[in-house]
Amino acid sequence: MTTIASISELLTLSKCQFRVYDLGRKIDKLSKETFNKVELNQLPYPSPFQGHAHLAIAFWQKQSPQPFLWFVKLPLDERGLLNQGARNHFVAIIVEALGADLSVDPTEKQEELLKSNPYIFTPSQYKLAMLNSLISCDLKAPASQHYQSFKDYLTEQNWLKWQEIGVQGITDFVARIEDKGHDELIANALASLPFEVLSPLCGALENKPLSLKIIESLLNLLSNTDTESPEKQQMLLRSLASSTQHPLVDSYFVNLLKKAPLATDLLICISGRCWSALSNEKRVMQFLEHLVAKNNAELFTAIFKDLVAIPTIRPILFQCMRSTERSETLSLAIGQLFTSQS
């Protein structure tokens, strides 16, 4: 049997249709071209998380449109390139367990082999709900039974009846946010939603580019949220994660980074979810100055290492490290960072 060199090749040889999603920071679809280049080490992984690529791979046979799902966590090197040995080991375990037909129902022994695969991980429930919604939407499958309940909740505006809606209904609605009237329903409801609904809604919104109506509503809520409510601020901020390139959101981050001080949770949210807002040297420098002002070496080290692994942020961070405009405190923190690594 010919050696199978990649996950893409394994799926193609098995005559599977497939889609790949990044699950690390937020949920993003990876094109087959990007995934193939990542597998060939022609591209660094676009959004690494904790030194790994967190992948959801949905695949199915043409005659059976119900997709199978793998959740795969593969290590990356310091440049963000995929660890080829780990990827090959993952493929070898799958081939040993299932052979050429990935769609077969595994036997008990095969199931045992699959469960012992060290590269499999379990995503959080809210990510799993959103992923299921995105896949069903991408494959033009119907939404779950919970979708209509959430739509009715937004339409009827009986905010106290939140116990009657499910998270899957929220994610199904957000996955179809481009459908007529969906953005208006959300925009009109945001200011009135109880925390128990707003929290999972923001967690879903972070994965979709948002319309002007929703962005304006979110920014208005943010501007009227008490700074003593950092949890709500963080929640609203993360909902903008896939919309940071919008002019209004971009302007919001310009003004936010001018403020002092920023809560630690907000700094973590920016680096973990809204990193694409740190689009130039000035903003990254402002962010680092906020971070160093916390006087927490452990926090500074953790966030710096997190950001430097992101391919789009890495060169900007290096520019900041060479800048003569950084404060003495920041220079000292960067120096201590590299001293501790040597």
Image (cartoon, grey):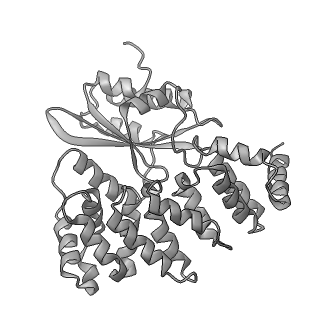
Point out the image quarter for the N terminus.
top left
Give the mark count: 0
In the image, what residue occupies the spot 51% across and 74% down?
233
Residue 182 position within the rendered picture, expressed as x and y whole percent measured from the top left:
23, 65
- Give whichever of 313, 294 is nearer the camera: 313
- Give whichever of 183, 173 is nearer the camera: 183
In the orientation shown, which residue stands out farthest toward the top? 1
Is 116 situated left or right of 31 in this image?
right
58 in relation to 93, above or below: below
In the image, what residue occupies the spot 54% across and 44% down?
48
- Give whichever of 64, 215 is nearer the camera: 215
Residue 28 position within the rendered picture, expressed as x and y whole percent measured from the top left:
40, 47
Residue 271 position within the rendered picture, expressed as x and y whole percent measured from the top left:
59, 57
The image quadrant that residue 6 belongs to is top left
Is 59 situated left or right of 288 in this image?
left
325 in relation to 89, above or below: below
Residue 302 position within the rendered picture, expressed as x and y whole percent measured from the top left:
68, 55
The image quadrant that residue 286 belongs to is bottom right
Is 318 situated left or right of 241 in this image?
right
Point out the image quarter for the C terminus.
top right
40 in relation to 287, above or below: above
- Give whichever of 107, 274 is nearer the camera: 274
In the image, what residue occupies the spot 66% across and 45% down?
316
